[in-house]
Amino acid sequence: GLSASYKSDFGINQDLVQEHQEKGNEALRVQESGAAIAHYTVAIANVPPPPLDPKKKDELPLLRSVLFANRCLALSRHKLWDLALEDGQRAVDSKEDYAKAHIRLGVAQLGCSLNEQAYVSFANALRHDENEYSARKGREICLGLIPRWESRLAMWRRARFARDIGRPFGDTNIYAMSEVHYDNPQNEEWANSIHATKFLDDVLLITGNLADSFRVLERAFTCLRPKFRRVFYVPGNHELWIVRTEAQKFPDSLCKLWAIMELCDRFDIDIFPAAVCKDVYIVPLLSWCNAAFDTRDPFPNPKSEANRAAKWPIDRDQQVWRYMLRLNQANLDKPYHGTVITFSHYAPRTSCPVFMEKDVAKTSGCPELDEQVRDIRSSCHVYGHTLCRFNQTVDGVKYVHRPLLVEVDFDGTLSKDSVTRVFNGSHLCFDMVDI
């Protein structure tokens, strides 16, 4: 602990460091944050940096983390957010399991309008100390702020809306993929066999369940992104599972969702609405299953093992699907016109066919999602998950689902399943196109 750091000889001026830390703490208590910054700076300057040799043990991680975390707090009170952000990150880097370091970093991230990253910091703090009230409060604040999509990253995504709005109508084909499951070697081989240049002027919609793990999802993006002019994506339930190897990386499924969104940014993959040419718009809609989709028994089954690998900070049966719809809310009132194609992972209408096995319908769709489809004035809605092929127009909206089907022939070769085209440059369609 800190007392051991002061008592042991690690090449620091122990008395000086302790004196200025205590003076900094006292200055914070009496709201003299400027003086606190000065005292913590002196203390930090007299603590040696971590050893460069990775074989040598760092004997002062907690002391270093506490000092940076405290100075981060003082800087935050002065609203020097960028400097506070640097200190908060240094505090976490010094001692990752120190909960208060994550809290201080989260506050600085909120000050910098990094709302999604702040959520992750507060969630990490709770992972190390579930009784931290400040972390729990900070996480709740983030849950309220994120659906506004006012963070720096969200503003960048929103700015892509009109990038192709002047592109001539008539030369853009739009394709859809569902249930690719790139984790499956046969499906990976199918995805890699898609022609490298045939679809370079076209748009791809991926309706989720592309991969279970973050690592495989990254590989799938690496494969598919270069083959199309523009790729739009929503995660499915599989992407939001926390697999065993990710338990230390993602405190919960929302943390993984924010990380997936940042991964999409890195690959230039769209997760927000955008025009893809003149008078044609794509609108991704996040979704989660609502047991009320099962009209025969519209109640959650508490014994269900479906999606147990997903980990939520809110009630999984009644609040997750509502929160996903709330995340869509800010994108419903944009100036859509002409042909509007919405897409989601889960089915939006109870008339969409699902398998009849017990409880399958409870995890297949969200009927409230259709209200958003209608609010947007969608022309066509593409969805995934159900594995039941569907192509039908209901009350003026075309609903489409065609899951990927890759089969291995007797000689070991793969069947070359086609890719589904939903817009051929001039009107909606449901065509199978060779890859």
Image (tube, helix red, strand yellow):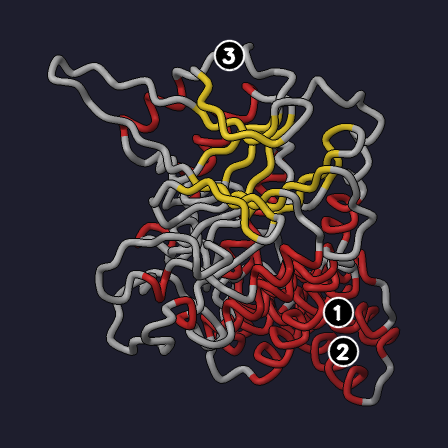
Distance between mark 1 and mark 2 Cα atoms: 6 Å
Going from N to C along the chain, the mark reached first, 1 or 2, is 2
Q: Which mark is residue 196?
A: 3
What x and y, as percent, mark residue 66?
Answer: 62, 70
Question: Which residue corresponds to the image point at 42% horizontal and 53% vertical from the top-left?
Answer: 352
What kind of residue is marked 1? Tyr
Question: Which residue corresponds to the image point at 88% horizontal and 73% vertical from the top-left?
Answer: 34
Residue 380 visible to an observer of this rendering: yes
Vertical placement of 427 versus 256: above or below?
above
Q: Which mark is residue 24?
A: 2
Nearer to us of marks 3 and 1 is 3
Vertical placement of 215 versus 249: above or below?
above
Q: How many marks?
A: 3
Distance between mark 3 and mark 2 Cα atoms: 60 Å
Q: Badge 1 is on which residue?
A: 40
Question: Which residue corresponds to the image point at 40% horizontal and 19% vertical from the top-left?
Answer: 192
Question: Which residue corresponds to the image point at 33% horizontal and 73% vertical from the top-left?
Answer: 296
From the viewer's side, name the closer residue of 58 and 256. 256
